[in-house]
Amino acid sequence: MSKQRIAILGAGPSGLAQLRAFEAARRAGVQDLPEIVCYEKQSDIGGMWNYTWRTGLDKNGEPVHGSMYRYLWSNGPKECLEFADYSFDEHFGRAIPSYPPRAVLKDYIMGRIDKQAISKYIRFECPVRWVSHDDSTGKFTVTVMNHQTGQQESSEFDYVVVATGHFSTPNMPYFEGVEQFPGRVLHAHDFRDALEFKDKNVLLVGASYSAEDIGSQCYKYGAKSVTISYRSNPIGFDWPQGMEEKPLLAHFEGNVGYFTDGSSKAFDAIIMCTGYLFHFPFLPDELRLQTHNCLYPDNLYKGVFFQSNPKLIYLGMQDQYFTFNMFDAQAWYARDVMLGKIALPEADERRQDMQHWLSHYAAQTGCNAAIDFQAGYIRDLNNATDYPEFAVEKQADLLKEWLLHKQENIMGFRENAYRSTVTGTMASKLPARWLDIKDDSLESFMSLDFAENKAFDKVD
Amino acid sequence: MSKQRIAILGAGPSGLAQLRAFEAARRAGVQDLPEIVCYEKQSDIGGMWNYTWRTGLDKNGEPVHGSMYRYLWSNGPKECLEFADYSFDEHFGRAIPSYPPRAVLKDYIMGRIDKQAISKYIRFECPVRWVSHDDSTGKFTVTVMNHQTGQQESSEFDYVVVATGHFSTPNMPYFEGVEQFPGRVLHAHDFRDALEFKDKNVLLVGASYSAEDIGSQCYKYGAKSVTISYRSNPIGFDWPQGMEEKPLLAHFEGNVGYFTDGSSKAFDAIIMCTGYLFHFPFLPDELRLQTHNCLYPDNLYKGVFFQSNPKLIYLGMQDQYFTFNMFDAQAWYARDVMLGKIALPEADERRQDMQHWLSHYAAQTGCNAAIDFQAGYIRDLNNATDYPEFAVEKQADLLKEWLLHKQENIMGFRENAYRSTVTGTMASKLPARWLDIKDDSLESFMSLDFAENKAFDKVD
């Protein structure tokens, strides 16, 4: 029998987790591993964590994947995304603060990747053009555009792992008059440098993480005013002077936005923080996941196996309290199914399992319950694999603390420190106010003095 | 025998020309016309002429087609793009100036389209996903995503007409340090409203139409300074105070651009006017035109029939002195081939014909010769069809005048008026300086007083 072939679409956090999962099996001595090809649109690994100055389309004319901006810091505690098989201590050799800037976090994520070991699997600058499934052979055909050669490539696979993310394709609503607005109108996906909005009156539309964080960025880097417009409920933090929330936009006249409470204000720029679309232009209808952003998309058994064709695997399609270690949990489980270590039940049984989770999910209310739900989901996956034990429930508790800390001080929550659930190390305190640390580079951040906390203040 | 089926990809100027060509045949009494389906990504006809406030990706997550900006006026005389079968006089009922704003020109282009007659052929919000050709049946299969239904559709066709344009996918070069530039970096494709750059120091990279026109727009709407960086040669116009040309960028440090002549300047924004890529993500290698922007792309017999499969037809892939009436010339010729009125010669003969034109093209030097070359190409097409006679050589002479008028006064060339080669009508003079007319709406422009010229000052 010829080797099984697996296509992984994307070499970002979830695709890399899948590669890492197979690499872990190889190191554990598993023989006859499948042949893996990972197709990546960008020219490097990292997915969303590859910051790019580009917006719109990339150098090959493909939609830019990244939604990262300069000066982005982790908006959740790093202790909640720590890999069980690669701790922050192992990577940095000392304690660092709980909310590192983008470059520092990326350094950590990439640190566990043996670039040499995995690079042979990855084909860069190869966006996927089309995937088809032949019901008679049971195989997928994946066609990619290899921009490095200028030629397309098609190949057959037994499994396809979709790891292309779902925070790349903007959802961009229309408001009457916006086409006449005499300034920049952009989606959060295209936001790059808050300094562009210094001394400006900025309107952010939306009330989720993007609005909250980009609004805070604009405030930090000198916007004249920041207005956040919500549809249903205000975010409700105790915003500093110069930031305010307003209800939904009704329309624009020139540079003036009119809101449903009858108020109005003139703006210099509009940033739509209105979320993302699930967008898989390379998948035919019968293989395409159709969902909104939630903690349990339907038709994915164990959150990953596409119900009507479980050899099609989707990673990371959930809304995310947990991120990297959830992708690991999914990737390890998916690996064990692909290796035949875990037998996939029949369709009916899979449907029952999904219904169980869906009704469990529907019964939850509030953020804390949602965090526990996702922790329970990860626990369920990890119980079935050899992924190193980690205290997902303790991480859930940290996430609940995080929510409280944001409520206490939205401009200062990143000054809190938490204890690693993996190593027990207490994070350093940020040595200055987040608002005052404006250089977000790896070098600059790592040269700050974290000493006061004494590194490796471990508990047993 | 079942009816032939033709797919037209795109309902912009060239796709509409193809629809119009068949409609003209129908009105002329031609029986048994083929069945036509036109797939359009946008939700309306007009292609590039559909101004959109959106940038990057559209409401369906598809790349935005339009590169149009607010305040765009025709940058060439309208007399050089007049349709032979639908004059400006017929549309407006009176003389108007030679360089109308976007909305006025669009009104004209759309005026000859019988929306009701053609709307039955067009499927809106249907970007093409994939085209394949079956060599055994000789048929194409076209698969589109119908965003109105959320489902894909596949259908077989005898001919495919690619009318998707080639000024939509940015060519975006990298310059060292640009990723650290603390302001907006955009491609001309994403430029929308010059008012965003009021009181700013703007750098434009490139020395072709986009740089020249967007630079002029920024100047007109109050940029503090406009700097144009060229690679090979300066554009060389007599720029007003506040605009200057510099040689190629070497790199950036912070907000300062360094040029190869050793000079440097601080900027607030960078607009890359660096051209476009030919981008056909829906075509397999063997059907995909590969060319750069020039007056005679190789492998297109008569500029339209793809050499290795002439049932695949490309419209408007040339660089353009002539535009709308060149698309007409191509569409009428392509129609007559599809209807069997013109027999396509064998591959060898087509190759010889292309070689003739290619060597003719290679022997040309200078803009005037290039204009004559394209006029000759159009003449060659029109001689073979029943497209109404128009004086393409006289239009070529107008284009040469246009070049001189730009040289004389780049900020005032739009104040010149030319005589229609179709009706003999002399255009009105612009009643004020172009720099002083800042409202570009159809209503505002058409309410200007053009009377001084006396409408319909015809010659016989």
Image (cartoon, coloured by chain):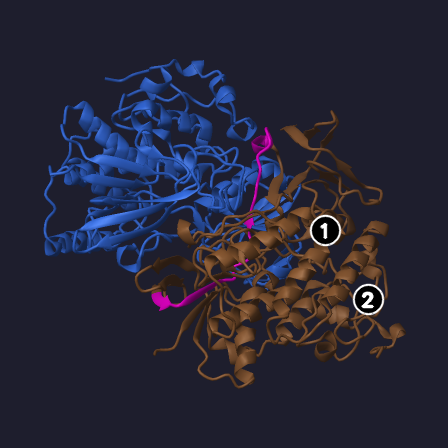
Chain colours: A brown, B blue
Q: Which residues are magenta?
A: A154-180
Quarter that holds the C terminus of chain B? top left
Residue B115 at x, y = what percent?
A: 34, 25
**Residue B453 sits above or below residue A115 on the image:** above
Q: Quadrant of residue A85?
A: bottom right
Residue A174 lies within the magenta run: yes
Closer to the chain start, of discs 2 and 1, is 1
Quarter that holds the N terminus of chain B? top left
- Mark 2 Cα-neighbour bin, 10 Å: few <14, some 14–19, many ≥20: many
Disc 1 element: helix
Residue B226 at x, y = what percent?
A: 58, 46
Q: Specify whether B33 is left or right of B451.
A: left
**Residue B150 sits above or below residue B258 on the image:** above
- Judging from the image, mark 1 belongs to the subunit labelled A
Task: Please name the residue shown 61% across and 60% down the image.
Answer: B179
- The image's mark for residue A213 is 1
What amino acid type should be assigned to the residue bearing mark 2? Tyr
Residue linked to disc 2: A418
Residue B330 at x, y = what percent?
A: 23, 39
Q: CA distance from mark 2 to mark 1?
A: 21 Å
What amino acid type should be assigned to the residue bearing mark 1? Asp
- The image's mark for residue B105 is none
Q: Nearer the viewer, residue B147 or B420?
A: B147
